[in-house]
Amino acid sequence: MIDPCSLESTSLLSLDDALERIKIAIQPVMASERVALKNALGRVLSEGVVSPINIPFGRNSSMDGYALSSKDINANQPFTLSLTGVSWAGKPFQGSLQAGQCVRIFTGALLPDETDSVVIQEQVSADGENIVFPANIAAYQNIREAGEDIKQGSLVCPRLKKLTAADIGLLASAGIYDLPVRRKLNIAFFSTGDELMGIGQQPELGKIYDSNRYALAGLLADPCYSVVDMGVIPDDRQLLEDGIKQAAECNDVIITTGGASVGDADYINDILASCGVVNFWKIAIKPGKPLAFGKIGPCYFFGLPGNPVSVIVTFQQIVAPALKQLSGAAANKPLRLLATCITALKKAPGRQEFQRGILTQDTDGNFFVASTGQQGSHILSSMSQSNCYIILSADSKGVSSGEKVLVEPFNVFF
Ligand code: AMP
Ligand code: MG
């Protein structure tokens, strides 16, 4: 039987199998470094962080009003307490309260020890020192208990969390100044192709602008990655081999685009096979069939196809989860949902397809998706207009308008 991963094989590997192989092949980086909290957004926590304090630190008011003891509440009729001071946010009331007394209090201010309830200012009438409260007020209302968000000594953020803005805020509320994160991945990338020219050059017949490096730089914009753009290397076996070997010495990952297919000028797989190990190279997805994954010494290698849409699809579906695993972050599956397709979609059975779609939602919350039109792997405008993939299974023979399809949203907040 022919191994689907060998260069001679003509059979294709399913995306799920490819992802499984990557999962087994990749060892996350273990080294860590301390970074200041303000620089930690998007980084991967290498150890869980425990709170040194209660959050909130002490019992405080959630409203502007009057703090009193529930023992002084008269449930049956309005009652009067005498005002004995003020508790400001940051400037707590210093004295102590006797029975029958209350204090003016503002949002975020500490409750005096003798009090346990706050009545909002709109519900009382103040006559000098005499504050009249209504009947039927609830005890313990409008207060925030010490530690009700996070208890002292409990976990604020778990190990391997990729830190969000909310995490950073929460860690700051615990007074965490710096924290241990996994080190950044060093990633080098380059384009290959004799037809490629830089975007500063005059257009020329037979040449195309190198768009892949720009798209890749965008896809790699992540605080966990330290990225080196190696430019364009021509379709020259020796130059490509030199570039790859050199990059493999000082990077965790190399990503190339182009030259990974079976044309006469496609050297990437040969080089990978002679300098390292090829894990697989043909995946049953469209766009994106020719794709090499392998290793050169300790450096992981992804040889992506040349067509610009294929680059983005294979990056998002294969490289991104792989890099995430390598960075140490906990894995998560992309959100996928069912939507009613409002355009017919053409598809031949054989490969799983990631067609580009425009996802919308009506006022009842129902999802609808339309094709972006032309689906060629060189039609980068289809990718630019889309906000989701329409995922069609390998055996699908196309979709009629009105059928439900699986979609994977992206860029939904742009
Ligand atoms: P290849 O995989 O090298 O056979 O390239 C497949 C197609 O993608 C060809 O039409 C190439 O011209 C195109 N292509 C390759 N590299 C790039 C690039 N960096 N930017 C835009 N198009 C590219
Ligand atoms: Mg080429």
Image: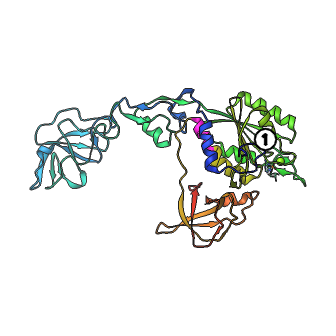
Instruction: Report x, y in % for residue 216.
Output: 70, 45
The magenta segment: 320-327
Give the main secondary structure, helix, strand or loop, of the magenta stretch. helix
What residue is at 54 percent from the left and 65 percent from the top? 339
Position of residue 79 relative to residue 395, above or below, is above
Depth check: give the residue in front, 174 or 354.
354
Q: How many marks?
A: 1
Question: Label 1 belongs to which residue?
Answer: 269
Tell me how the rendering is colored.
rainbow
**Is 249 rendered above or below residue 333?**
above
Q: Is residue 324 magenta?
A: yes
Please name the residue shown 62% across and 47% down the image: 17
Picture coordinates of residue 409 (x, y %)? 57, 57
Is residue 313 visible in the rendered image? The answer is yes
Judged left or right of residue 97, residue 144 is right
Q: Secondary structure at mark 1?
A: helix
Residue 368 lies in the magenta stretch: no
Which amino acid type corresponds to the residue marked 1 in the rendered image?
A: Asn
